[in-house]
């Protein structure tokens, strides 16, 4: 299957087109437009820069699926920003988020079946996941409390910690459990946003998802710390 060389540009155009569709169907405030277009622009710049840095001339079919998911996440972000000024069409927000979650299961399958698994694709997929979780946590936090924001902020706190402590920048070994935990966060937050469950059950589910996230990140930090000690003692060479 041939790669597509203009995917970042196509993604930005698609983002604006989807925002225009939202504006025409359910309405979109200035805040929604600003957040949605800013997200699309940042995604375009970051993806183009990453391709240049990694020496990638073209994106593969799986990256195209991830980019489609990224544009949907931009719509979710726009609707969440919209919710601060008016009542959000929650059915639309949840429907878009669900499609994004379904595509999250598709891009990995496409990458493996087309033999186009790449470091760039994996990182792109992870960042889209992280941002979807962040915007959903912002929306859910308005009804359940600010503690929910910890779920969305965890990934970014880990990145910032790596800037401060270089030992946290070491590459972690592959662990499928991370993907399971990330998917769990998104699924639980979508249910919480839809408000279809009793409040008590929703709080328990979100708290459980947060506990899983803390365990997952905690295990990674522990692994990095142990290997830092081993390296200092000269028992392990990267």
Image (cartoon, rainbow, N blue to C red):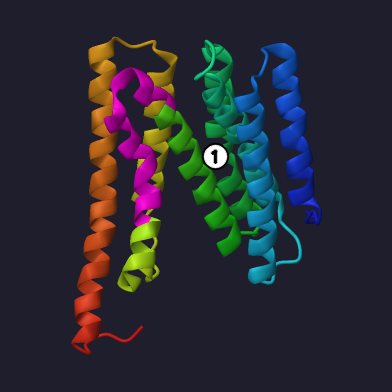
Q: Is residue 226 above or below residue 107?
A: below
Instruction: Return the x and y of residue 116 as percentages of the image width and height.
Output: 65, 59
Mark yes or no: residue 182 visible. yes
Say left or right for 191 vs 59. left
Q: Quadrant of residue 166?
A: bottom left
Q: Is residue 145 magenta?
A: yes
63 displayed left or right of 204: right
Which quarter of the rendered picture does the N terminus lie within? bottom right
Mark count: 1
Residue 196 rendering spot, x and y as whole percentages: 39, 10
Task: State the residue position of label 1.
Answer: 104
Nearest the camera: 174 or 14?
14
In the displayed structure, 117 sits above or below 224; it is above
Q: Is residue 143 above or below residue 34?
A: above
Of residues 81 and 152, the one nearer the viewer is 81
Q: Residue at x 34, y 49 (%)?
A: 177
Q: Residue at x 59, y 16 (%)?
A: 92
Task: Describe the element under mark 1 as helix, strand or loop.
Answer: helix
Q: Residue furthest bottom?
A: 234
- Residue range in magenta is 139-158
Judging depth in this view, the residue of 227 and 41 nearest the camera is: 41
Q: Tell me the quadrant of the picture where the C terminus can be found.
A: bottom left
Alpha-carbon neighbours of circle 1 within 10 Å: few (<14), some, or many (≥20)? many
Hey, which quadrant is residue 73 in on the image? top right
Magenta-drawn stretch, dominant element (helix, strand or loop): helix
Q: Residue at x 69, y 72 (%)?
A: 55
Q: Position of residue 114 (x, y in %)?
A: 67, 54
Residue at 35% from the left image edge and 42% from the top image edge: 181
């Amino acid at each position: 299957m041939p790669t597509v060389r203009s995917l970042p540009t196509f993604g930005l155009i698609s983002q604006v087109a989807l925002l225009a569709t939202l504006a025409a169907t359910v309405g979109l405030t200035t805040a929604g437009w600003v957040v949605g277009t800013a997200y699309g622009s940042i995604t375009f710049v970051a993806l183009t820069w990453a391709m240049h840095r990694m020496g990638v001339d073209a994106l593969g079919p799986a990256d195209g699926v991830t980019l489609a998911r990224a544009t949907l996440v931009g719509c979710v972000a726009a609707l969440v920003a919209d919710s601060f000024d008016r009542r959000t069409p929650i059915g639309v927000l949840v429907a878009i988020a669900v499609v994004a979650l379904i595509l999250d299961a598709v891009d990995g399958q496409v990458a493996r079946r087309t033999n186009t698994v790449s470091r760039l694709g994996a990182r792109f997929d992870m960042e889209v996941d992280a941002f979807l979780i962040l915007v959903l946590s912002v929306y859910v936090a308005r009804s359940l409390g600010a503690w929910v924001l910890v779920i969305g902020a965890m990934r970014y706190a880990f990145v910032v910690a790596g800037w401060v402590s270089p030992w946290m920048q070491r590459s972690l070994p592959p662990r499928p459990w991370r993907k399971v935990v990330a998917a769990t966060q998104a699924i639980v937050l979508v249910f919480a946003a839809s408000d279809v469950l009793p409040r008590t059950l929703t709080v328990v589910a979100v708290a459980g998802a947060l506990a899983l996230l803390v365990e997952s990140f905690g295990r990674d930090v522990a692994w990095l710390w142990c290997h830092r000690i081993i390296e200092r003692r000269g028992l392990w060479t990267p």
